Amino acid sequence: MKFDMHCHTKEGSMDGKIPIAEYVQILKSKGFQGMLVTDHDSYNGFRRYRDHLKGKLDGFVVLKGIEYDTIDAGHILVILPEHVKLLLMECRGLPVRVLQEVVHRHGGILGPAHPCGERHLSITRTRAYKKNPAELMKHFDFVEAFNACESPESNTDARRLAMQYGLPMFGGSDSHHPDCVGTAYTEVKDNITCESALISYIKEGHSVNYGGEYYHGTVKGKLGVFNHVLVEGFWFYNHFASMYRHHKRKLALSLLNQ
């Protein structure tokens, strides 16, 4: 089966421009059999699918994931079993080690998105990674080794990172615009129809292939050097948003520990 493993929707990501129904149709037209919805700190894109599209897609598989904003290690892709409902995943700002513990405690898997990309957004460009990379990486289950919106150098380094720690490699478009949809893929040999099946497939060490083509219409590509200003602005936004959601995260964590 061929999946796009990094997908942003209009319903779930504030910078997403593609309604999930349109996303599905584009992927189907390109020969994909499924997608992993990975909106920023939100499951709203998947909820839109669940409430309005589920059972109407002729076998096309839509899986629930999330791209979580940690406070100290950039963006992390998270996949939880379909029966697990965690409010905490929609509260940005957990430290990466806490996120790893919570996800694994609930039977999920996780891995760094675009791990060698932009400062603050990518794990290898953060202090948490530089402090003890081996300790951090051993608690991941996969690495996004090809991101269509990253540079060839970034993806080459991501592949090396995955190989260094013996982790499965995913490919995802990271698309926010229609013309980027399906520019990267992940292929699995089993018939994956739910999150638990994908989690088991990865944990059992089955074969995963990935690849894609580069997308040249990214915002950072158009902004050039000014993109650094945008990235720094996002860092401040993420920290202030994390502070704002502190009490909500604390409540969610306390409920988990009861």
Image: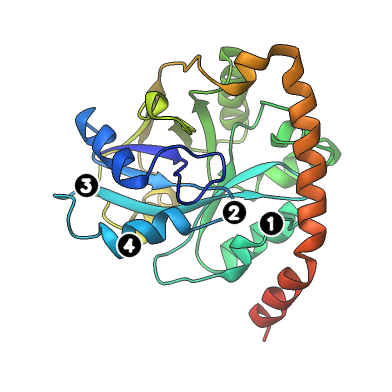
Residue 119 picture location, percent across and down: 76, 29
Cα distance between the residues tagged 4 and 2:
17 Å
Which residue is drawn at the image coordinates 30% and 40% (left, top)? 22
Could you tell which of marks 1 and 3 lies nearer the N-terminus? 3
Q: Residues within 10 Å of mark 2 (few under 14, many from 20)?
A: many
Q: Evaluate if marks 3 and 4 touch, with contact meaning CB atoms under 8 Å apart.
A: no
Which residue is found at the position 39% from the left and 21% from the top? 212
* Residue 198 sits above or below residue 137 on the image: below
Q: Quadrant of the C terminus?
A: bottom right
Residue 209: quarter of image: top left
Three-letter residue code for mark 3: Phe
Q: How is the image coloured?
A: rainbow
Q: Position of residue 27 (x, y in %)?
A: 28, 34
- Earlier sequence position, callout 4 versus callout 1: 4
Location of residue 97 (image quadrant): bottom right
Give whichever of discs 1 and 2 has the lower sequence position.
2
Looking at the rendered structure, which numbered label has been put on residue 92?
Answer: 1
Residue type pointed to by label 1: Arg
**CB within 8 Å, label 3 to label 2:** no
Dot 3: element: loop
Instruction: Tell me the crowding category of disc 3: few under 14, some 14 to 19, or many 20 or more residues within 10 angstroms, Cα based.
Output: some
Residue at image mark 3 = 60
Name the amino acid type tagged 2.
Asp
- Residue with the mark numbered 4: 50
Label 2 sits on a secondary structure element that is loop
Image coordinates of residue 130 in percent, x first then y, are: 82, 35
- Do residues under tags 1 and 2 come within 8 Å of each other at their CB atoms? yes
Sooner in the amino-acid sequence: mark 4 or mark 2:
2
Which of pointers 3 and 4 lies earlier in the amino acid sequence?
A: 4
Circle number at residue 41: 2
